[in-house]
Amino acid sequence: METIGDVLITEGQIADAVSRMGKQISADYDGKELLLVGILKGAFLTMADLARAINVPVEFDFMAVSSYGDATKSSGVVRILKDLDQEISNRHVVIVEDIVDTGLTLNYLLENLRVRQPASLEIAALLVKEGIQQIPIDVKYRGFDIPPDFVVGYGLDYAGLYRNLPYVTVLGEDDIG
Ligand code: IMP
Ligand code: MG
């Protein structure tokens, strides 16, 4: 199959990273129950694959957020489109994100969820853009540190498209059109 853009992370590399993250999480939460909170829509593939790489009991919940701004930049003003279905007090919670860019979305989510007094709260993110977080975010479980280019695939979109690509790729001018 022809690939789109310049492939940054292959399907196999993603599978290896997700498996490693799952092992770390399984070891850290041994003997505990975990609530995975996927951030829609981007994290749906990471959530699905990561959950299957974890061997402690997990429950799922999802939040949908949108950050105001143009197509490729986050404004830091976050709107909750869908909140959690469940209470998280005294639960061990891991937020599952596709990518940490400015860090503004996760910073907002951490503050918002901390108030609900979970037993613990950590972050798993497939991708972390290097050196451009406006707020330092402690991403305990991370797949890859990547350069600060705009990427798509494996859940990540440009204008709603490309989420279904099984790899992570950097779009060229031609691909965006
Ligand atoms: P942040 O608030 O700047 O950290 O970015 C949060 C959200 O912006 C991510 O969860 C993504 O949905 C989106 N985003 C950031 N960088 C990219 C990218 O390179 N490609 C696609 N979406 C991105
Ligand atoms: Mg997102």
Image (tube, helix red, strand yellow):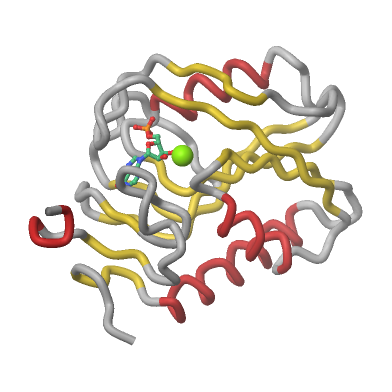
Q: Residue at x 22, y 53 (%)?
A: 147
Q: Quadrant of ligand 1?
A: top left
Q: Residue at x 62, y 16 (%)?
A: 112
Q: Is residue 111 left or right of residue 165?
A: right
Q: Residue at x 8, y 56 (%)?
A: 173
x then y, percent, for residue 26? 75, 61
Instruction: Tell me the quarter of the image containing the N terminus.
Output: bottom left
Q: Quadrant of residue 54?
A: bottom right
Residue situated furthest bottom in the rendering? 1
Front-lying residue, 42 or 160: 160
Residue 62 drawn above or below residue 81:
below
Residue situated furthest front in the rendering? 177
x then y, percent, for residue 34? 81, 46
Q: Residue at x 63, y 65 (%)?
A: 49
Instruction: Tell me the quarter of the image containing the C terminus.
Output: bottom left
Q: Is residue 28 left or right of residue 137?
A: right
Q: So how many labels did they put on this image? A: 0
Q: Is residue 114 left or right of residue 68?
A: right
x then y, percent, for residue 73? 25, 31
x then y, percent, for residue 70? 25, 27
Q: Is residue 31 left or right of residue 127?
A: right
Residue 80 drawn above or below residue 159:
above
